Image (tube, rainbow, N blue to C red):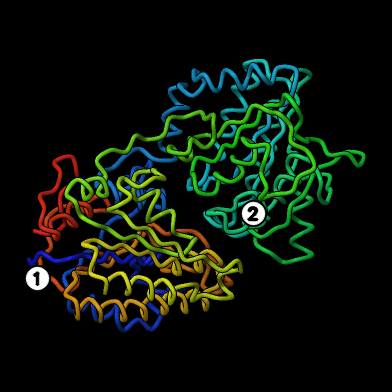
Amino acid sequence: MEKKPVVFFFMDGVGLNESSYGNAVKNAYTPTLDNLMKNCPWKAISAHGVAVGLPTDNDMGNSEVGHNALGCGQIYSQGAKLVNESINSKEIYQSTTWKELIANAQGHTLHFIGLLSDGNVHSHINHLLAMMEEAKAEGINRVRIHILLDGRDVGPRTAQIYVKQLEDKIDELNDADFDAKIASGGGRMEITMDRYEANWKMVEDGWKIHVEGEGRQFDSAMEAISTYRNELDLDDQYLPGFVIAENGKAVGTIEDHDSVILFNFRGDRALEISRAFDNENMPQIKRNKYPHVYYAGMLEYDGDLHIPHKYLVEPPKIKHTLSEFLVNKNVKSFAISETQKFGHVTYFWNGNRSEKFDENLEDWVEIPSDVVPFDQRPWMKAAEVTDALIEAMKSQKYQFLRVNFPNGDMVGHTGDYEATIIGVETVDLVLKRILKVADELNYTVIITADHGNADEMYQKKKKEDSPIVPQTSHTLNKVPFIIYNNNVEMKEEGQFGLSNVAATVVKLLGFEPLTVWNESIIK
């Protein structure tokens, strides 16, 4: 094994799947990746379930927990598991924030906003249902729910399943002293859940729908979904916003003195709407009113910037990250991606930390993403990201460089199989460029992914003659871990996942891994 600078190459959303059915990875033209897997040391590693701190191996991995595990070399209870533990122990209801939310909503309205599904990536419907039960038990009289339709982490047209589940709970709880209703909603890629400030208009539209009650009116969420489907033929994630009304009046606008809970636990798509509630002066969005409410998120979505100001469940305290280790060793590093995954190679990689450990030793570059559906431009900003990365490599200022190419994930989420093949082929093409520079300047290159997505673009058929149904969610498949341009030997024994990568990186850089990290993948 030779000590040399390392380039860490993320093929976001590119997993391993033996089946060719709907497999935009296997069916793409990827001569570079094929050659690497034929001639380089590599291993299939886990990127989902318990390997990344989620409750079970039936839980899909995601970019956030994946980058956490990669960047800290350990497994922390994450997302759903963290919230499950707090709800099951009832610790969440003992928190100061919960008590203040309930006290504030007495005589007013308690609102819930969040992604309505059991996808377990951004939220879980069971968390909402549990909090509704507790709110009634603690004397809340009026609840309004603002639902964001998924169709991304679950089947593309499954919204009615979750609306029915919620409506059944509402029917069970409602009585003379308790009044709960669905108040508004819309697709997750249309309103409210923007991330990385890519499209503030989504947040503005969500504000008008949820808070101001301004939008197309329907008698029920079911009616809104079926009407939009008939008119527009869109999957759940792209359905326009809607307002539930009675006699022409919205049933659940958000008013002064109300309490509001965002029940999403994942941070990236929760930050902007949280900022909108926490800050009256928000030039990024236009709004007609700013009600003074008690607002809280399920988690603190940004621990450095303290967004939101109030939250229900303490986030994992991630310590001993790879970035901190390298700073302590005086190693200069470089991180780059386009907007859609910039936060992943910085904030999530650094253990949910927005700030650098050392301004002089860490350089971060963001290439602005296009604000268009990714199936329309599946190459995204791969060329521009690659240009900047190669410039950084040629500067030879850095011993560790990391880059994320979002194509396999972001285009995969659109459900467009043909476009996703182009996205995967784009990543293979830029990988070829980077390996050429690595040869010239003698860099080691690690190639891996944070989870699968493009490797399963179709849902499994129930019958041979069943129609093809797109799959837009992540997968449960392992991901490749490849080492290029270094004579290393992979360990044969053991179960390896993303949390084993940090120790592997520092070994390649010539350092001894921390004892708190999971073991290295190489001998």
Crowd around label 2: few <14 · some 14–19 · many ≥20 (10 Å): many
Work out whether residue 233 or residue 355 is closer to the camera in this orientation and state it: 355
Taking the image as shown, residue 326 lies to the left or right of residue 146, namely left
- State the residue at coordinates (54%, 49%): 269
Taking the image as shown, residue 389 lies to the left or right of residue 289, namely left
- State the residue at coordinates (62%, 30%): 295
Determine if residue 403 is in view. yes
Q: Is residue 11 above or below residue 86?
A: below
- State the residue at coordinates (47%, 39%): 305
Work out whether residue 385 or residue 154 is closer to the camera in this orientation and state it: 385
Judging by the rendered image, the residue that carries numbered circle 2 is 200
Q: Amino acid at mark 1?
A: Asn
Quarter of the image for the C terminus: give it: bottom left
Taking the image as shown, residue 412 lies to the left or right of residue 55, namely right
Q: Position of residue 4 (x, y in %)?
A: 14, 66
Q: Is residue 299 above or below residue 287?
A: above
Q: Amino acid at mark 2?
A: Trp
Work out whether residue 229 or residue 237 is closer to the camera in this orientation and state it: 237
Task: Tell which tag, 1 or 2, sits nearer the viewer.
Answer: 2
Image-quadrant location for residue 333 = bottom left
Judging by the rendered image, the residue that carries numbered circle 1 is 487
Q: Position of residue 15 (x, y in %)?
A: 36, 65
Q: Residue furthest front?
A: 360
Disc on the earlier residue, 1 or 2: 2
Image-quadrant location for residue 11 = bottom left
Which of the labelled discs sits on residue 477, or is there none? none
| Marks 1 and 2, how far apart at CA | 47 Å
Determine if residue 462 is in view. no
Q: Position of residue 366 (x, y in %)?
A: 44, 62
- State the residue at coordinates (43%, 30%): 314
Mark 2, secondary structure of its residue:
helix
Taking the image as shown, residue 177 lies to the left or right of residue 420, namely right
